[in-house]
Image (cartoon, rainbow, N blue to C red):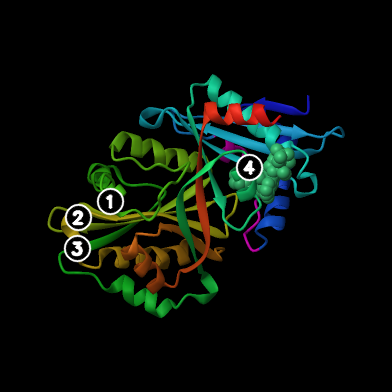
Amino acid sequence: MPLKQLVPSEMTADDIRDWCSVLNDMTAADMPAEPRWRTDRLRDYLVGTLPDDRRFAFLYRDDDGDLIGHASLIMFGGDQAGTGVVEMSTRPSARGHGVGKALLRAVAACAKAEGCRTLSVEVIATTPAVGFYDRVGFKRAVVEQRHLLRWADVDWEKIEQAAGRLAAGYRLEYHAGGVPERLLDTYAGVKANLRANADVAVVPEWRGSAQADRLRDSLATLERRGMRSHIVVALAEPFGHVVGLTELVVAAQRPTRADQYDTVVDPAHRSYGLAMSMKARLLTELRRAEPQLTDVQTWTIETADDVRWINSELGFVHDVDWYDYEADVDKLIERIERDA
Ligand SMILES: CC(C)(COP(=O)(O)OP(=O)(O)OC[C@H]1O[C@@H](n2cnc3c(N)ncnc32)[C@H](O)[C@@H]1OP(=O)(O)O)[C@@H](O)C(=O)NCCC(=O)NCCS
């Protein structure tokens, strides 16, 4: 059988090495300016999930035993049960021969067997994956703009100034690796406002929660997966409650690239410039804590004008769009079988 389904903890050291090699061949062909993947903690990255989530891996080897394609399927639990996220790559030299379709057929069958009804996938707009997902019947649900801040272009004087400009009655705290217990409840409370003011429309694997216990799980999962979190919170005096937060992650598997995730301010504390101060402060901390970094990426939806303005003030530049595609699992299976 060229195609094998397994849980990531069953992957051998060779599987992990080959997985990384396909990812890097794909990156070199489709997104040559993007940083390459490393095998450092790649096993942890693939194995770690939130307690209610499950992940399966699919490996496609040719007759010589060379890995020519792979896929990952994460199925969410909890309040997102019934939905899953797919990631797939075919080695560029093996494309156009049905490997992608065979992987997707296996993914869809697994999803159905596990009770998953909807699959989504994130696709970079300039890559051949767009044609593939259109062909197999996925529909574009959301367009996100990816913005990149290149370390070499950062105006540090401007960032330091922005970090130091803070409205009276507030203070900022920086935390690496998680949120202290004393802040967890009010931190989670601010997260509840996220949908109204999100940097990110959909982040498949990082789902911060508005509940303290789930938030604790989320942060612990990031750490287990080799993803170092860096967080700045805005606290309102005199009680020291969290009223704003911004989160960023650096993955051991791609340590020159940071992913800026959520930034959110409690509605009662908006218009005081807190988001700008927090994001600028986070960048100054990051410069010290992660000296190997070369850039930071973030995503905004088209309507998030306030976030986009802050990002552009900090030096982020929009370089490419990302599409979130979705498909109904039953319809996907029907379509693949019909075309077979
Ligand atoms: C997307 C990807 C996995 C497709 O792999 P593949 O092995 O070449 O796909 P297949 O050969 O199985 O193609 C299946 C069908 O899609 C079509 N197709 C594939 N790529 C296409 C493209 N760029 N444009 C139009 N149609 C395309 C094929 O012609 C085929 O059609 P058919 O059913 O009529 O024969 C591969 O291009 C890839 O690895 N891309 C980079 C990874 C990536 O960005 N993934 C997205 C994020 S997870």
Residue type beneath disc 3: Tyr
Which numbered tag is attached to residue 170?
A: 3
**Disc 4 residue: CB within 8 Å of ligand 1:** yes
Q: Identify the image quadrant of the N terminus.
A: top right
Instruction: Give x and y (percent) for residue 238.
Output: 12, 57
Q: Which label's residue is closer to the chain start, 2 or 3?
A: 3
Region rendered in magenta: 33-47
Q: Which label's residue is closer to the chain start, 3 or 4?
A: 4
Q: Nearer the viewer, mark 2 or mark 4?
A: 4
Q: In the image, is residue 120 above or below residue 152? A: above
Q: Confirm whether the magenta stretch covers residue 36.
A: yes
Seen in the image, is 284 located left or right of residue 327? left
Q: Secondary structure at mark 1?
A: helix
Residue type beneath disc 2: Pro
Q: Nearer the viewer, mark 2 or mark 3?
A: 2
In this figure, what is the number of numbered marks? 4
- Residue hosting label 2: 267
Callout 4 touching callout 1 (CB < 8 Å): no
Instruction: Give x and y (percent) for residue 328.
Output: 50, 32
Q: Which label's residue is closer to the chain start, 1 or 3?
A: 3
Q: Residue at x 53, y 65 (%)?
A: 295
Callout 2 touching callout 3 (CB < 8 Å): no
Q: Secondary structure at mark 2?
A: helix
Q: Secondary structure at mark 4?
A: helix
Which numbered tag is attached to residue 135?
A: 4
Instruction: Give x and y (percent) for residue 172.
Output: 27, 61
Callout 1 touching callout 2 (CB < 8 Å): yes
User: Can residue 39 be seen at all in this image of the molecule?
Assistant: no
